């Protein structure tokens, strides 16, 4: 996955002339805060150094994860053509950029962001939609002021909120969702548990689950297993240098739930792990529409089903 060229160019302008040593130091401090899921009352992106580190090392990965989740929304709801989006905890506007890339129909985005440092960066990146409104406020203050949007996005925010704030936020976001709500989190066991909780709340208040689950029953996975997906992200030279990595890509693990007021196309199953391919068979771990998860072996001698299974990747749906 590559960033849209206009976003890549705007990021490069932001990072022009920044000392690599400063960027590397800020990137390490930021990833330490994310890894430990620190909740000390401070925003992770509280200053310019952290905001630049986010642009360099995290935005490409969160963009890739959000884009992959939006693909799943489009598969489930090919008729969905959102005109308005609400991006809650927008950071530099990653999710709005990803949505604008997916839907030409999008005319307006409202981005809520509490950190002035990352909001200023986001404003300079210059998301090109007819109407873009940045709200400089915390979610609890801003969400009482905004009108419903066709698409509501909450990407990589839940882990920064106190546990007690999550259920009221889900209900508030759902009330502001005219059509579809997408929540994305890091693909860790803790991220999965937060998504499971969000999914439970949404099902309870009447939302239709579009993806990734092909059913609205209890999640069939149990710890230490957890549901997550992976998106491959191209790394810029600066990204590699700031993180000290050598390979020109990284795999971002993520988990999401997309919920809608309209039911989506029903999938038979979704591939929930890296397929294991051998010469004689391919094995897919599937979450199925009957609510069960199982490894299914597609033998070469089975012919057509093997050919279909061989083309499927982690995160893909098996169509009915
Ligand atoms: C990890 S960043 C994700 C940014 C963006 N959504 C993305 O996916 O790249 C989380 C963002 O949520 C913002 N945030 C966290 N808690 C917030 C709150 N209570 N109100 C508004 N923004 C908040 C943070 O300042 C930060 O910019």
Image (tube, rainbow, N blue to C red):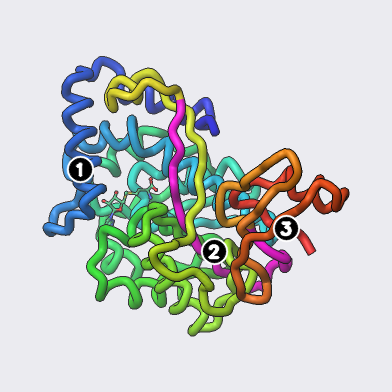
Q: Position of residue 69 (x, y in %)?
A: 55, 52
Q: Which residue is mark 1?
A: 32
The answer to whether mark 3 and mark 2 are in CB contact below 8 A is no
The magenta stretch spans residue 149: no
In the image, is residue 6 above or below residue 69? above
Is 168 displayed left or right of 162 in the figure? right
Q: The C terminus is located in which quarter? A: bottom right
Residue at 25 percent of width and 48 percent of height: 34
Considering depth in this image, is 19 or 320 the residue closer to the camera?
A: 320
Q: Which residue is mark 2?
A: 258
Dot 3 or dot 1, earlier in sequence = 1
Is 99 displayed left or right of 36 in the figure? right
Q: Nearer the viewer, mark 1 or mark 2?
A: 1
Magenta: main secondary structure: strand
Residue at 62 percent of width and 47 percent of height: 275
State how far apart marks 1 and 2 are (Cα): 29 Å
For label 2, being within 8 Å of ligand 1 is answered no
Magenta range is 249-270
Q: The N terminus is located in which quarter? A: top right
Residue at 54 percent of width and 57 percent of height: 84
Q: Position of residue 302 (x, y in %)?
A: 85, 52
Residue 226 visible to the viewer: yes
- Quadrant of residue 246 in the image? top left
What secondary structure is marked by label 1? helix
The magenta stretch spans residue 267: yes
Q: Position of residue 133 (x, y in %)?
A: 40, 50
Q: Position of residue 28 (x, y in %)?
A: 20, 34
- Quadrant of residue 216 in the image? bottom right
Q: Which residue is mark 3?
A: 318
State how far apart marks 3 and 2 are (Cα): 18 Å
């Amino acid at each position: 996955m590559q960033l849209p060229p206009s976003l890549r160019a705007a990021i490069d302008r932001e990072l022009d002339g920044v000392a690599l040593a400063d960027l590397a130091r800020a990137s390490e401090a930021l990833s330490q805060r994310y890894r430990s899921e620190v909740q000390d009352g401070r925003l992770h992106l509280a200053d310019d150094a952290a905001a630049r580190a986010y642009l360099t090392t995290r935005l490409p990965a969160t963009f890739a994860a959000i884009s992959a989740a939006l693909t799943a929304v489009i598969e489930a709801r090919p008729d969905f053509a959102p005109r308005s989006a609400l991006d809650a905890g927008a950071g530099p506007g990653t999710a709005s950029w990803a949505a604008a890339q997916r839907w030409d129909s999008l005319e307006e985005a409202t981005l809520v962001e509490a950190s002035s440092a990352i909001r200023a960066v986001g404003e300079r990146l210059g998301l090109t939609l007819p109407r873009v409104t940045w709200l400089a406020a915390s979610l609890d203050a801003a969400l009482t002021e905004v009108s419903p949007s066709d698409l509501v996005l909450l990407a990589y925010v839940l882990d920064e909120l106190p546990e007690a704030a999550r259920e009221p936020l889900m209900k508030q976001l759902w009330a502001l969702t005219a059509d579809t709500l997408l929540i994305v989190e890091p693909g860790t066991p803790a991220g999965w548990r937060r998504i499971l909780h969000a999914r439970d709340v949404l099902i309870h208040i009447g939302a239709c689950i579009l993806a990734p689950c092909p059913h609205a029953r209890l999640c069939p996975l149990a710890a230490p297993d957890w549901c997550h997906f992976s998106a491959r992200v191209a790394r810029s030279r600066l990204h590699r240098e700031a993180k000290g990595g050598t390979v020109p890509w990284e795999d971002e693990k993520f988990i999401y739930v997309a919920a809608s007021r309209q039911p989506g196309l029903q999938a038979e199953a979704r591939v929930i792990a890296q397929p294991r391919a051998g010469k004689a068979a391919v094995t897919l771990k599937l979450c199925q529409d009957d609510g069960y998860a199982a490894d299914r072996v597609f033998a070469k001698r089975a012919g057509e089903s093997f050919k279909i299974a061989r083309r499927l990747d982690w995160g893909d749906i098996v169509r009915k």
